[in-house]
Image: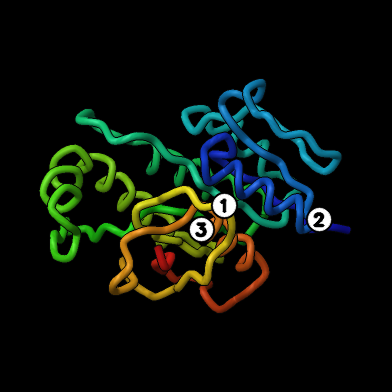
Amino acid sequence: MSLRIVIFGANGPTGQILTEQALAKGYTVTAVTRHPKEFGQQHEQLNVRYGDVYEPATIANAIEGHDAVLSVIGVPYSWKEITVYSQSATAVVQGMQAAGVRRLLCTTAGANPNLDLRNEGIVFGLLIKPLIGRTLYKDMHRLERIVMASDLDWTIARPAQLVKQPTVTSYQVGEGYMVPGHRRTAYPDLADFLLSNVTEERYVRKAVAVASPL
């Protein structure tokens, strides 16, 4: 029987690639999104269903019967308060505990909790991150605290600036918030890292940076 995984945030750029890669590996995939009708992929081993982090029951119901959970939920930068990351973490952790599912892989970003501006570049370091991105990064860190406080077998991937790339590259992984000298992470690389570690134990209960040579 193939590995059964559920992907939250499946309709986003990372989620779409993650779904494609998982199906190519022969996994049985449940893709969860707020807009199932807009999900363009079809496959005999793919089930697309509705889920919203602000409706925790829809998250818990989607988790039941799976071997692992991959959460790549994301929202744009906003001046307004953002809670979708922490809300998703709470709903996913509680749903997994109720269902008896232990393996969780999720994503945040390579931004440290103190909004350290070193090595970030002028635009990202002085404008996007401390001003426009402040509410987003704060909620990502709330997500990390919720996940880290759980008893699950979690792994947190912290990509740098996400960019398009046709194929998987020779990406690097390092503990912490950044891989020195690397400021970009290709979507296929992030997806590949998550899938490659569903059954691996090397990064269990660790938060790591994932970066591409771009």
Instruction: Give coordinates of residue 120: x percent, y percent.
Output: 19, 59
**Tag 3 residue:** 190
Q: Residue at x 42, y 50 (%)?
A: 163
Q: Earlier in the sequence, mark 1 or mark 2?
A: 2
Q: Residue at x 59, y 39 (%)?
A: 10
Q: Which mark is residue 166?
A: 1
Instruction: Tell me if I can see residue 210 in this picture.
Output: no
Q: Name the amino acid, label 3.
A: Leu
The residue furthest top is 37
Q: Earlier in the sequence, mark 3 or mark 2?
A: 2
From the viewer's side, name the closer residue of 95 and 106. Answer: 106
Q: Name the amino acid, label 2.
A: Gly
**Tag 2 residue:** 26
The residue furthest bottom is 202
Color style of the picture: rainbow
User: Does dot 2 land on a helix, a strand or a loop?
Assistant: loop
Q: CA distance from mark 3 to mark 2?
A: 19 Å
